[in-house]
């Protein structure tokens, strides 16, 4: 499991995103962007954050440390904002914390990433069907000169269709990835080389290791997969089917790296 910390103080909401994440301090003296289990998108977003974020880490893509943030009922009692108080009350227990990177700033057209790193991020997004890495919302940070990938809750769209049962991974395995709006679409030329390296590494053992990090409490039962073990197996099967096939989903068309424009100096999370 990823390590667990206890929230000691709710600092401030981050109102850039619809799920209303917030900055919290914890008993390890760390500061985290907290994604709340009680937010409207539900626990599946937290599952996607862990699965894709930890997969990114194992593929050499920089991403902030993820922790489970245990939220006590006392945290929300003195919160003046009723919307925030309701969210905290609905999120007692295990939530997701993303290590806050002080001094980081949001990626924009003024940033020129390493082409191989950019291609790795694009490859991972194509594998996991990330629909939220556009210029409107890059979900990338620059920290100490390096590119960091954040906010993977919009990946793995297939699990939102599991209300009637897990079903077959075949459709997801063959679904093309539309990179036309991707912030790193200009680095598609590097995908074939990156694919040759990364596809071999994403095997059953690696995927099982990653999904094992998801707390049981976030794995909500669906018909045919009523236990955390069955749900973990389903995530593995879907991702393994996609990476093991012909990979027609890979957006290998050409493009050019983006240039120009100032960087925005804040840490944005949605």
Image (spheres, grey):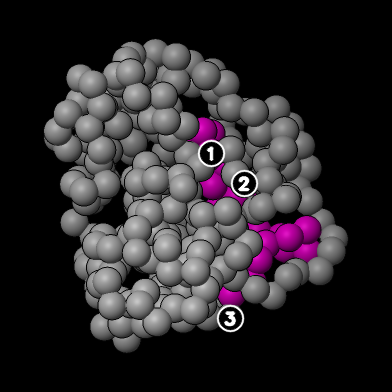
Disc 1 on helix, strand or loop? loop
Which residue of the protein is positioned furthest toward the right in this rendering? 260
Of residues 248 and 2, the one drawn nearer to the viewer in this rendering:
2
| Residue 255 part of the magenta-drawn span | no
What residue is shown with label 1?
130
In percent of width and height, residue 135 lies at 73, 50
Which residue of the protein is positioned furthest toward the bottom in this rendering? 29
For marks 3 and 1, the one nearer the N-term is 3
| Residue 107 part of the magenta-drawn span | yes
Disc 3 on helix, strand or loop? loop
- Part of the protein shown in magenta: 104-130
What residue is shown with label 2?
133
* Number of other residues with Cα within 10 Å of mark 2, as a class: few under 14, some 14 to 19, many 20 or more: many
Tell me: 117 left or right of 113.
left
Q: Are marks 2 and 3 in contact (CB under 8 Å)?
A: no
| Residue at screen point 32% across, 86% down | 29
């Amino acid at each position: 499991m990823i390590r667990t910390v206890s929230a000691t103080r709710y600092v401030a909401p981050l109102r850039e995103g619809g799920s209303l994440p917030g900055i919290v301090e914890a008993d390890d003296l760390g500061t985290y962007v907290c994604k709340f289990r009680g937010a409207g998108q539900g626990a599946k977003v937290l599952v996607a954050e862990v699965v894709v974020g930890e997969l990114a880490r194992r593929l050499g893509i920089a991403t902030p440390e993820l922790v489970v943030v245990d939220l006590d009922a006392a945290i929300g009692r003195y919160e003046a904002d009723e919307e925030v108080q309701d969210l905290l009350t609905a999120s007692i227990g295990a939530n997701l914390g993303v290590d806050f990177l002080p001094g980081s700033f949001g990626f924009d057209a003024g940033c020129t990433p390493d082409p191989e790193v950019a291609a790795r991020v694009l490859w991972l997004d194509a594998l996991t069907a990330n629909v939220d890495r556009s210029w409107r919302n890059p979900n990338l940070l620059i920290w100490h000169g390096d590119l960091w990938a954040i906010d993977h809750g919009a990946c793995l769209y297939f699990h939102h269709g599991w209300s009637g049962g897990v079903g077959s991974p075949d459709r997801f395995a063959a679904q093309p990835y539309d990179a036309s709006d991707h912030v790193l679409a200009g680095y598609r030329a590097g995908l074939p080389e990156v694919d040759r390296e990364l596809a071999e590494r994403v095997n059953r053992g690696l995927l099982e290791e990653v999904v094992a990090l998801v707390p049981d409490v976030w794995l909500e039962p669906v018909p045919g997969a009523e236990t955390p073990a069955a749900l973990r197996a389903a995530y593995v099967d879907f991702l393994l089917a996609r990476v093991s096939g012909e990979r027609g989903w890979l957006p290998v068309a050409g493009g050019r790296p983006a240039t120009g424009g100032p960087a925005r100096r804040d840490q944005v999370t949605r």
